[in-house]
Amino acid sequence: MSGQDKENHVRRQLGAVLFADVVGYARLMGNDEIDTYSALKSLLEQLEAACQLHDGQVVAVRGDGVLALFETATDAVKFGVELHQIADQNNRSRAEDQQLRFRAGVHMGEILVDDRGIHGDNVNIAARLQEIAEPGRVYVSASVYEQIRNRLRFGFEFLGPRRLKNIAEPVPAYCVRSEIEGAAMAATLRPANQPVPPQQPEIPSVAVLPFTSLGGDPTDSWFADGLTEDIILNLSKFKNLFVIARNSAFFFKAGLMPPQDAARELGVRYVARGSVRRAASRIRIAIELIDADSGRTIWGERYDRDIDDIFAIQDEVTDAVVAATAVLIEAQERKRMSQTAPADLAAYGYVLRGQQYIFRYTRQDNHEAQTLYERALARDQDYARASAAISRTMNIDWRYSWAKDADHALDTALSFAQKAVELDPTDARGFGELGFVHLYRKEHDAAIGAYQRALALNPNDADLLSDYADALAHSGDNEAAISNLQQAMRLNPYFPDQYLWHLGGAYYNLKEYDAVIDTLTKMNNPTEGQRMLAASYAQLGKMELAQDMAARHREAHPNFSLDRWAKVQPDRLEEDTQHFVEGLKKAGF
């Protein structure tokens, strides 16, 4: 047979491998060779029959060892437990020094299958786990534990990463306990010498566990590591997140323990983890974000791409994952904080509560947000984000004429933005609010400069990118504004209404009125888009729709003044302001 023919008979297969071996077999044979051989032969026949009942196959019997293959980890572990039960039953009639007891190891992964049996590192790992197992026990790897932890009524004792003979990386091991023992155990026991886990910090905390490479190509492994490092680096740019450093996160490489256990060890509330699989010219990257307190997956995504430029794929996925993770953690925290008594909230909690009100654009909601931000600053006068948030509320007070002294409100907004930057010059949000104030003071170059400084500090903050795009549109660069807004929406698929509002403004400047209408009608709360919708309908000659939208706007903002609004519009080009005013007048404003 040619080498090619032999190669064609080898296939890859995902499976759960069990290896079991008799404890002290050489000693038993030395004591009574015939009796031991006969007893083992009878026992192996029983085990092979039991294996078939668990949809498994005994691939080989190697002297005193059994190698079996299963489609699922569940079947492999159930058989492993039953193997010991069958052996115990047979031992009841045997003297204690002649009893046949097994050790067993189970691992799950990709294996090589040919006419001679099964092969590969994943088979070796099962055999090496068996070697370190206690007599009468089944030891499993983390890949098996992940599959069975919520499916079987056994206890699982975490043994930590174990060095196995001829296996390059340490392998996390778990000891399977019986159903009775499992009922008395708290799911996963920690070793007695474990240090006390650190407390969670006040701000949201996240660990990005090393992504798992599911293929056999070493290139996939470094790509997975690089992707993990980039996500950690870019998440760390969000000042409102506590992100576990790379060195600590990479202690859990190769799935050293389940995500909830890793979260306890690292003292974090959220865990992100993922995998990379390559097949021919395609690559699949999967990721999930887990709330470790509840064990619930709060977000998951899969990216399937052609491998044209591996580094471009890495950048694209990193940006998307970082933005989505930051947004969803903050949303989850807002939900959690809303259920907490105000007296128990730390400064960060007050800011999060304020975020629930700030973008509703009503006088009462803006006042509520401002009050909460001021409480945050009262608790921590050096809290840069609280200063930045107060700046935004002052700016909104000025724009909507809600402040008693309009000029003072805008000056105060500038003062708080400058204070935020002074308190923490590495926090992008302070520079973002500084850009926002400069924009409405019609200091366009200063606004663009502040936003660019903010995005240099954190290029993955989609909200900042949206605000920057709005500044570009008001500066006359509408094509760049649209491009940046599309990027913001890719970074934050759960984007708030103001992204659409900003995009509609750029389209309006370009006189693409149908695009304005298509964009703004997607808003969850269209109140702030009603002016632009009315103007767009009017420019298209759809007067009934324009007048209806104008009437709705008057209900929401009875004190609206077109003359003042024209003065507030922060356009660099006077023709852009007059174009908007023209549409509003046509609509009946």
Image: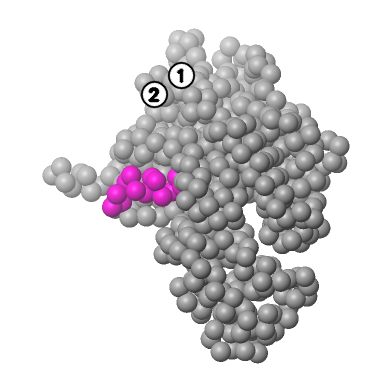
Q: In the image shown, does 434 or 241 lie closer to the viewer?
A: 434
Residue placed under numbered mark 1 in the picture? 163
Q: Quadrant of the N terminus?
A: top left
Report if residue 445 is visible in the image. Answer: yes
Residue placed under numbered mark 2 in the picture? 167
Q: Amino acid at mark 1?
A: Arg
Residue at the location (67% across, 73% down)? Answer: 562
Colour option used: one colour
Residue at the location (78% across, 32% down)? Answer: 379
Q: Which mark is residue 228?
A: none
Residue at the location (77% across, 41% down)? Answer: 374
**Label 2 neighbourhood size at 10 Å, few (<14), some (14-19), many (20+)?**
few
Cα distance, mark 2 to mark 1? 7 Å
Q: In the image shown, does 340 or 70 lie closer to the viewer?
A: 340
Q: Would residue 557 appear left or right of 542 to someone viewing this image?
A: right
Q: x, y (%) of residue 499?
A: 57, 61
Q: In the image shown, does 108 or 282 lie closer to the viewer?
A: 282
Q: In the image shown, does 425 or 439 lie closer to the viewer?
A: 439
Q: Secondary structure at mark 2?
A: loop
Q: Quadrant of residue 538?
A: bottom right
Q: Would residue 542 appear left or right of 477 to someone viewing this image?
A: right
Q: Secondary structure at mark 1?
A: loop
Q: Quadrant of residue 383?
A: top right
Q: Amino acid at mark 2?
A: Ile
Q: Which residues are magenta?
A: 307-319
Q: x, y (%) of residue 462?
A: 53, 51
Q: Are marks 2 and 1 in contact (CB under 8 Å)?
A: yes
The residue at the far left in this view is 2
